Image (cartoon, helix red, strand yellow):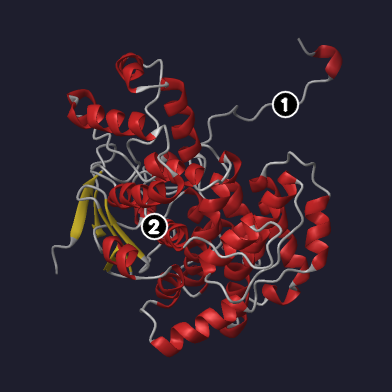
Amino acid sequence: MANDTLTITDNRTGKSYEVPINEGTIRAIDLRKIKVEDTDFGLMTYDPAFTNTASCRSSITFIDGDAGILRYRGYPIEQLAEKASYLEVAYLILHGELPTASQLKEWSFWITNHTMVHENLKTQIDAFHHDAHPMGMLCSSIASLSTFYPDARNIGNEANRLKQIYRLVAKVPTLAAFTYRHTKGYPYVYPDNDLSYSGNFLNMMFKMSELKHSPDPVLERALDVLFILHADHEQNCSTNAMRSVGSSQVDPYSAMAAAIAALYGPLHGGANEQVLRMLAEIGSPAGIPDYIAKVKTGEKKLMGFGHRVYKNYDPRAKLVRDTAYQVFEVKGRNPLLDIALELEKVALHEDYFVSRKLYPNVDFYSGLIYQSMGFPVDMFPVLFAIPRTIGWLAQWNEMVQDSEQKIARPRQIYTGYDSRDYVAIEHRD
């Protein structure tokens, strides 16, 4: 349409400029033509933390934060969590369509047959101190995989990219379980190809002296649902890291190590751990009013509420809460649940929180489930990294094939000194 443009008048010069609007955006590079002098660099946008900047075009995940909508490739997250397996959703996220029965069988076969890791990786994990954080060990191990698979540098070959995707989706649960076993001083458990993706991970985590470990089907399904809910979430911090580092055309193992490092942070993958610490600090439902009062004065933070994107109830939060009850039926009721339920009730009815659109997010209940299933708190971000692997790789694969993408190189606003001369040390104040 002829009127799909934005007219900008520069009040410094009185000049007007017409900028095209496409898909609700303008190209930042179009602002460069707005200058006072011909020698000027041109106008830039300043957007710390990319709060209103689209860095790519993607067909993978759609989020409407105001309406509380999350879809993978057009499918509502509620339907996928109820009806699909994690590997089925992983195929969808990567390939764009739900698999047929034969496609799912082939996909599952290749994932299952890439779960083993080189024995030298065990030696690397053994070199860490027994109390090393599992996330640090996982990040290091994933980066090391690039040295085991030098063919991964050939990112221009589609078949080769798919081979690396098989390897990463398959090996991350194995390495994750190994990091846990190392912190416990237990012998490593090798993958069992007879088990499902989630069941195999539970096997590698918790098998002891029994000849064959059979995970509880309720816990296995609960973990599958949690994996589905965490598989991708648009251009979050770690995905942005994956794309940014990957834009240098480095291998996917190195790029994913950067994504894991981003996920390691307490504002990203460690959020559900902070929820548990908050609930433990509150102590009982009777302690909620005092804690809420401190939140309002800024002394405390309400962890697990609010989201950078969602300004409504996080659609994943309800699904996680429903899953929590299923897990508690098997493992017993988590004593922190009563505090969580009462805290949610208070926050959803207090105008202070409602007016600020602070609704429960996926982290509010996920930590309670993981804790009840026997996962230590240090493993929580690792449990996030396992399912997010397919999201990172799908985003990376999409970026590699996008002709508009170049090596990431943001601009800056320089605020330092103007040019000045060197002063000999004996003459410095």
Q: Where's residue 93, x and y in %?
A: 41, 70
Q: Nearer the viewer, residue 351 or 106?
A: 106
Whether label 2 touches label 1, CB < 8 Å = no
Can you tell which mark lies on residue 302?
none
Q: Dot 2: within a 10 Å radius of its alpha carbon, few (fewer than 14), some, or many (20 or more) residues?
A: many
In this picture, residue 293 sits left or right of residue 113: left
Quarter location, residue 18? bottom left
Amino acid at pointer 1: Asp
Q: Nearer the viewer, residue 207 or 276?
A: 207
Viewer can see residue 276: yes
Viewer can see residue 46: no
Provide the residue designation for mark 2: 229
Whether 188 is drawn above or below 286: the answer is: below
Can you tell which mark lies on residue 421?
1
Q: Quadrant of the C terminus?
A: top right
Q: Nearer the viewer, residue 148 or 248?
A: 148
Q: Where's residue 417, x and y in %?
A: 60, 27
